[in-house]
């Protein structure tokens, strides 16, 4: 009996010690004794081993060779639960020196935990437009300190396959300039047995979501910011209603790929367009689904682009929708080496590192010094000729921007569960949520 | 206290500690958190019952309740089908071992992989529709993942019935192996046909196993369906397969409204607790009757 009791006592003592052991060891981010600094980066792009990771590895090597005192430890975190991991690090008060964020509300939530960068970027601030810096400032307020260095400018637009346009009897060098021309082109393509618009609608119907962002740019233009303040609304706006009707028409006339409902946008739909399985694609100006991928697949001169569809009810024309900072790097307040961390961030945002970033990934850099012509893709220069109008989605609350809007699009246009009026009402609800949150 | 009793408490203490830390504390912390506004980091703000008021006004919450209830309707089929198959197999079937291996595959693969496979299988241009067209059943080749009611019912059928069919068969076969053969002999002598023997001998003899399976089915649908739904349909199209459990994930880990997500989780906890209490009471009553 005594032996059993002793065994039990030992086991009970072992339990807490095992729990303490399982908590792991504290990762040290401090400067090494020899004066060298190890900078840890967390990001959700590094896991893309074929696309982004090779570029980042090259840039890391470049930065380390330019800054012999710095060692970079780049950690690719899973995309799906990335912000949970960053939040856990914040709660623990320790973690990486540099964290990648999406621009906008997802970064603003961390403003209290990231350093103000103004003094570090002062010397090269002019290389990036104030449009981007303002977006990367605390809570998006240009008067407040900058908390993130933008790595990409993102946007949305419509790519088309010139060869298929030609096959359908359309002029491949002339993109549809208004709704009538667009619809006529779709009809010709359909009659020629070509899918007019390659769509990715399974799960999140991004093809519709992105098309709306293009439409909204034309409806509100520079006034789009007022959607966040209540001066502009979706409800009661005839052009917004018309844009929803146009999307309906694209479905009812069979211009959207009938197989789109069982095609995920990422990457199936994009791959379908790159494989020539349809004439047009509502694509991205980002590090995926973009000009470089399509030009590489269909030929440098085989891809055309137009930013939006002009329609009479919209107040503006040819507006190009964009996000001033798609992704960017912030330095966490707990970093023991903020100077070294900022050197790393700078290495990504300007100079040779930035040129590598854009050239290898196809992401659009916000840095004005990047030599676009040297990339060898005339299309990207054409895209960047036009200025960007703020994407309305960046004004929304996190849950509406990254989930609910897509569900409303699915209900209104894929499953036809809700009417256009109801769609407008729920979209207006997203704007009301912004007001309530303020 | 007798030394034997002391020893008993000492023996169960590690398990009790684990239960306290990993079950009781999270449940209580969740209820506590439901009275706060918290973004998953930083300071939480006490807001009283505001989360509950918002939840009852939230259309999505009621949609998720409705969808969850629809999925629960698949439990009877999910219970009866494996029992029937097991009853047939109990009498011996040629090639049973191969069949058993095939229907058990979903249990080996797990929910995430099965969700992915199912989402591919049920695509409009997926293998299922190809087979249906090939055998001349074009009318049944539907757009399974784009029609809301169809998607929800497909989810119910795949997740609630088919996915656990293999495990159910093995579970009930094991239960049936303990039935006294003399009962079947007596039924045969009395001239009972297969169906009557099934209802009057097989089913009553495995009552406890059936009750356990029912409890398990409720838990599976209420609190363990998330990984399958996430990979199968992501709660869509629209909100078509958006369940209470999916809503907790969405509010907690997409919107990072942790306090609000805790409110939803508290409701799910209450529903699970009520069902569990009801079922335990039923099992006790049946046990007393026996």
Image (tube, coloured by chain):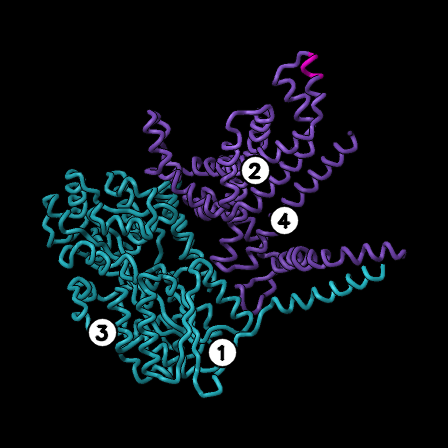
Chain colours: A cyan, B purple
Label 2 and label 4: CA atoms lie apart by 26 Å
Q: Say which residue appears at 35% left-offset and 61% top-offset.
A: A48
Q: Which residue is mark 2?
A: B167
Measure the alpha-carbon separation of dots 4 and 3.
55 Å
Please indicate, yes or no, whether residue A315 appears anywhere in the rendered image. no
Give x and y (percent) for residue B94.
52, 25
| Residue B136 part of the magenta segment | no
Q: Residues within 10 Å of mark 2 (few under 14, many from 20)?
A: some
From the image, tell me which residue sits under label 1. A29
Q: Are marks 2 and 4 on the same chain?
A: yes
Q: Which residues are magenta?
A: B186-190
Residue A57 screen position, x and y as percent: 34, 71
B189 within the magenta span: yes
Question: Which chain does the numbered disc 2 sit on?
Answer: B
| Foreground label between 2 and 4 | 2
The residue at which mark 3 appears reads as: A370
Q: Residue at x 20, y 51 (%)?
A: A312
What label does residue B269 carry, if any? 4
Mark 1 — on which chain does it sit?
A
Per the model, the C-alpha gap separating discs 3 and 1 is: 33 Å
**A197 left or right of B189?**
left
Q: Are marks 3 and 2 in contact (CB under 8 Å)?
A: no
């Amino acid at each position: 009996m005594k032996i059993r009791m002793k065994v039990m006592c030992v086991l009970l003592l072992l339990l807490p010690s095992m729990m303490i052991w399982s908590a792991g060891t504290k990762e040290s981010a401090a400067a090494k004794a020899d004066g060298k600094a190890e900078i840890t980066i967390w990001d959700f792009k590094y896991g893309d081993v074929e696309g982004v990771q090779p570029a980042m590895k090259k840039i890391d090597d470049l930065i380390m060779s330019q800054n012999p005192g710095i060692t970079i430890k780049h950690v690719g975190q899973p995309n799906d639960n990335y912000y949970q991991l960053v939040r856990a690090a914040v709660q623990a008060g320790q973690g990486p020196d540099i964290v990648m964020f999406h621009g906008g509300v997802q970064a603003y939530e961390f403003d209290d935990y990231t350093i103000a960068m103004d003094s570090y970027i002062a010397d090269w601030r002019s290389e990036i437009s104030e449009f981007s810096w303002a977006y990367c400032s605390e809570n998006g307020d240009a008067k407040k300190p900058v908390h993130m260095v933008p790595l990409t400018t993102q946007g949305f637009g419509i790519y088309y396959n010139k060869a298929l346009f030609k096959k359908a009897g359309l002029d491949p060098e002339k993109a549809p300039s208004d709704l009538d021309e667009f619809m006529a082109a779709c009809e010709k393509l359909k009659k020629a047995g070509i899918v007019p618009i390659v769509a990715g609608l399974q799960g999140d119907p991004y093809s519709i979501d992105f098309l709306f962002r293009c439409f909204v740019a034309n409806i509100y233009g520079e006034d789009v910011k007022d959607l966040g303040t209540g001066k502009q609304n979706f409800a009661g706006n005839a052009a917004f209603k018309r844009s929803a009707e146009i999307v309906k028409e694209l479905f009812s006339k069979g211009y959207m790929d009938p197989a789109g409902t069982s095609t995920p946008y990422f990457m199936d739909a994009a791959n379908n367009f790159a494989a020539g399985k349809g004439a047009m694609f509502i694509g991205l100006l980002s590090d995926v689904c973009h000009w470089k991928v399509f030009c590489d697949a269909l030929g440098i001169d085989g891809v055309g682009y137009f930013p939006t569809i002009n329609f009479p009810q919209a107040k503006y024309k040819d507006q190009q929708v964009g996000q001033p900072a798609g992704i960017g790097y912030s330095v966490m307040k707990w970093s023991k080496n903020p100077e070294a961390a900022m050197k790393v961030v700078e290495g990504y945002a300007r100079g040779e590192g930035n040129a590598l970033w854009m050239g290898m990934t196809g992401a659009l850099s916000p840095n004005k010094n990047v030599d676009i012509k040297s990339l060898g893709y005339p299309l990207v220069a054409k895209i960047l000729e036009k200025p960007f109008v703020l994407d309305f989605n960046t004004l929304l609350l996190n849950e509406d921007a990254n989930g609910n809007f897509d569900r409303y699009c699915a209900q209104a246009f894929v499953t036809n569960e809700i009417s256009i009026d109801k769609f407008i009402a729920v979209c207006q609800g997203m704007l009301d949520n912004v007001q309530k949150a303020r | 206290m007798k030394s034997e009793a002391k020893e008993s408490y000492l023996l169960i203490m590690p398990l009790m500690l684990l239960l306290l830390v990993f079950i009781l504390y999270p449940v209580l912390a969740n209820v506590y958190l439901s009275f706060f506004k918290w973004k998953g980091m930083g300071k939480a703000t006490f807001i009283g019952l505001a989360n509950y008021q918002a939840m009852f006004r939230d259309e999505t919450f009621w949609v998720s309740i409705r969808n969850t209830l629809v999925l629960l309707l698949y439990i009877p089929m999910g219970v009866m089908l494996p029992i029937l198959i097991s009853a047939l197999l109990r009498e011996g079937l040629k090639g049973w071992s191969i069949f058993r291996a095939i229907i058990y595959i979903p249990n080996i693969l797990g929910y995430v992989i099965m969700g992915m496979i199912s989402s591919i299988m049920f695509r409009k241009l997926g293998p299922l529709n190809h087979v249906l067209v090939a055998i001349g059943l074009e009318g049944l080749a539907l757009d399974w993942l784009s029609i809301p009611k169809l998607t929800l019912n497909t989810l119910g059928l795949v997740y609630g019935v088919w996915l656990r069919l293999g495990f159910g068969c093995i579970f009930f076969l094991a239960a049936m192996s303990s039935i006294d053969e003399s009962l079947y002999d007596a039924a045969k002598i009395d001239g009972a046909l297969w169906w009557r023997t099934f209802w009057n001998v097989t089913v009553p003899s495995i009552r406890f196993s059936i009750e356990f399976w029912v409890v398990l089915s409720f838990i599976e649908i209420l609190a363990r369906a998330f990984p399958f739904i996430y990979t199968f349909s992501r709660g869509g199209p629209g909100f078509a397969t958006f369940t209470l459990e999916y809503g907790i994930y969405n509010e907690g880990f997409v919107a990072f409204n942790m306090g609000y997500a805790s409110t939803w989780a508290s409701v799910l906890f209450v529903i699970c607790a009520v069902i569990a209490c009801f079922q335990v009471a039923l099992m006790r009553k049946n046990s007393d009757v026996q």
